[in-house]
Amino acid sequence: MNALVVGAYWGDEGKGKIVDLLAANSDWVVRYNGGDNAGHTIVVGDKKIVLHVLPSGALQGKNVAIGPDVFFNPASFLKDLNHVRESGFSPGKIVVDERAHVIMPYHIKLEGEKIGTTKRGIGPAAQDKANRTTDVTVFDMTSPDFLKKIKEVVNEKEAQLTAAGILGKNFDAETYCRRIYEVYSAYAARIRQYAGNVSYMLNEEIKKGSSVLLEGAQGSLLDVVHGTRPHVTSSNTIAGGAAANLGIDLRPFKIIGIVKAYPTRVGEGLFVTELGNYEDTKNEERNKPLTIAEKKSVVEGNEKLLGRWIRMDGAEYGATTGRPRRVGFPDFVALKYAAMINGINEWAITKIDVLGGKAFKAAIAYKKGTSITERFPFKLEGYEAVYGQTEYFWPSMTEGQCKAAVSEGYDALPKGMKQYIKELVRHTGIPVRMISLSPERDITLINGVFERTVEYLRK
Ligand code: GDP
Ligand code: IMO
Ligand code: MG
């Protein structure tokens, strides 16, 4: 089976966990967008591994590739690789596309404070990509003319680098280029062996009948075109981005949307179903479990504290930057939009365990003044959520109960959970293939899920 995994909300949906699971049946796992702004967490036994650039299939010993439109930080790549190897895993073949855009030290320095980025230099690297003459590729980095290339680029960017204080006081251009070269040529020496053309490789593999898994980074609502601009990332995160970025035909691919049971968002930008607000979340005291009195206040309708409760139970702190993630009520408007713009065939729901013991509702429309819409607006200003009548609730499940649910199958899930899943399926028109109940690879329910959720669409 060829499949593509894409996040439905604003990232951190649990793509890493699902990719790791699906990788067991894949020959190749390929990253098609983003860079080390991503943080994909995989838990295997007592090991927790966060990968930023390397595809999550690396832990299943699979062949992995990094596509030509990835913003490639060589240091992060090597760190990921070391991390995987030191944890006792080893990927199969590794291919890094020679056209991938290298993140240079000045990209990170040039990153502004606006919009709450991950500060990995993704935006500035994307500007150089669009600029064409100032882009440094893996091809450039691994060629004998690398120093010459750095000099040309720094020369062209000199005014910008001087204005930003990168050149001038501490460095003249010549010294700066040599410094970069020293560090980056050492990376290049280790990466040269992996450089190749991922488009030819993948097309040949697909033709041969190999099974390919494509791993998206970020989420649909962070797409540079279809997301909540300007608070988005710099790449096409949606499924179609993979066709354009990798140069492959997506028709043989199943598109799997990863839906976290509740949306989260890091960084700035409007968030219609948010529980509490951005500033509160940002300034919140870490790891402070709710008191009994606070939990009581949640039952009485304190949404800010419900947000904190979900954040605590779901460990919603950024895998890349450690920032607390903003949390919201499930949003069927956003999910319906994600299903449409990606062409999603089936959902994988993650972190549904986190909502156990917490009553919640889901947005079914947005409202602005007197007008109500089921469409996801380009500009969210002034919109508020219209929630469905149903309040969902089921008691929280222990790890043992989650494990048991995995073997017993879909029918044995708590009633309130199935009710939520049913509404999600009906609102989006997409059935569910799997339900993740823990960070652990194996605690994922597949048995009976697709069959039952397809039935929801027939009735
Ligand atoms: P990604 O960026 O989409 O790969 O997601 P992240 O790794 O940034 O964040 C997802 C977090 O949720 C990670 O800490 C995972 O270990 C964890 N996780 C994934 N699936 C589940 C689940 O079903 N239940 C719980 N409780 N945690 C999960
Ligand atoms: P994964 O793959 C969540 C967000 C940043 C910021 C905006 C732009 O782990 O789901 P950027 O550094 O890309 O220019 O930042 O996008 N962002 C993510 N949020 N998960 C991610 O990746 C993200 N990658 C970028 O927080 O709001
Ligand atoms: Mg993440």
Image (spheres, rainbow, N blue to C red):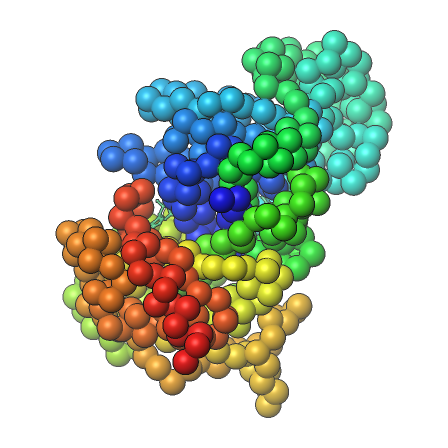
Q: Residue furthest front?
A: 208
Residue 389 occupies quadrant: bottom left
Q: Is residue 185 left or right of residue 393?
A: right
Q: Is residue 171 visible?
A: no
Asked whether 329 or 434 is in front, the reply is 434
Q: Is 198 placed above or below 12 here?
A: above
Residue pictured at 48% horizontal, 78% vertical: 364
Q: Is residue 175 left or right of residue 232?
A: right
Q: Position of residue 321 (x, y in %)?
A: 46, 41
Q: Position of residue 111 (x, y in %)?
A: 64, 39
Q: Is residue 388 left or right of residue 406?
A: right
Q: Position of residue 451 (x, y in %)?
A: 36, 64
Residue pictured at 61% horizontal, 87% vertical: 371
Residue pictured at 16% horizontal, 66% vertical: 292
Asked whether 37 or 307 is in front, the reply is 37
Residue 280 occupies quadrant: bottom left
Q: Is 176 placed above or below 111 here?
A: above
Residue pictured at 57% horizontal, 78% vertical: 374
Image quadrant in which the C terminus is located: bottom left
Q: Position of residue 256 (x, y in %)?
A: 49, 54
Q: Residue furthest bottom?
A: 370
Q: Is residue 365 visible?
A: yes
Across the whole image, how many numbered discs are drawn on residues?
Answer: 0
Q: Is residue 219 left or right of residue 171?
A: left
Asked whether 331 or 104 is in front, the reply is 331
